[in-house]
Image (cartoon, grey):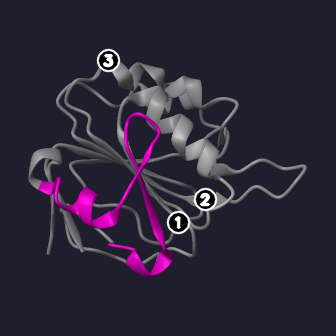
Amino acid sequence: MIRLSSPSVGFNGERILHPTTLTRNFAIKNGDSNEAMIARVKEGDRHVVFNCHGFPASPPNKAYLAIGQMLFEDNVDACFPWMRISTLRIIWLAACNIGGSGLPFCKKLAKTTGCYVVTNTGPSLDRAVKLGTIEDNYAAMPSYIKPSGEMIARDEFMALGSSLGFSRI
């Protein structure tokens, strides 16, 4: 498990069984505006968790997060307002399979927002967790991406926990 510092924001997709239990949590329905979802993140927030289904690229289809109007590499620029939130540090993608063929999407999300992005290459667990925590999906072969879009090793990323506002428990 990973404990996130507060305040943290959870966006829960429609087909998720166990919603996040962070400082603020939102149920995002299919078709809800991406812009309205993105506007819910405010100065002071440290983490954003997308708790939704993720789909890898499978030509001709591109990788995407199944939340709201869907987030693709082509429309991830909608997240640019987060670049101006000086306190926002990490975007956690609790979504299956997006970190493999969807890595270009994840890297663009990091560069667009100026945040670290944590994503999974394999299946993610959808289970209830304690208040203020998320699953450490190490078995899902996570990838860690710097705000520059460059990859960072797990050990190096985990060593940044205190400065980025998270801890392993």
Q: Where does the image place residue 130, in percent across and percent down from the top left?
A: 21, 72
Residue 2, by quadrant, is bottom left
Q: CA distance from mark 2 to mark 1?
A: 16 Å
Mark 2 Cα-neighbour bin, 10 Å: few <14, some 14–19, many ≥20: many
The answer to whether 74 is drawn above or below residue 100 in the figure is: above
Element at badge 1? loop
Q: What's under tag 2, amino acid-wise?
A: Ile
Could you say which is closer to the camera, residue 42 or residue 62?
Answer: 62
Could you say which is closer to the camera, residue 113 or residue 79?
Answer: 113
Q: Which residue is mark 1?
A: 16
Mark 2 or mark 1, which has the lower sequence index?
1
Give the residue at x 42% y 70%. Answer: 18
Could you say which is closer to the camera, residue 154 or residue 161?
Answer: 154
Q: CA distance from mark 3 to mark 1?
A: 29 Å
**Which region shows up in magenta?**
136-161
Mark 3 or mark 1, which has the lower sequence index?
1
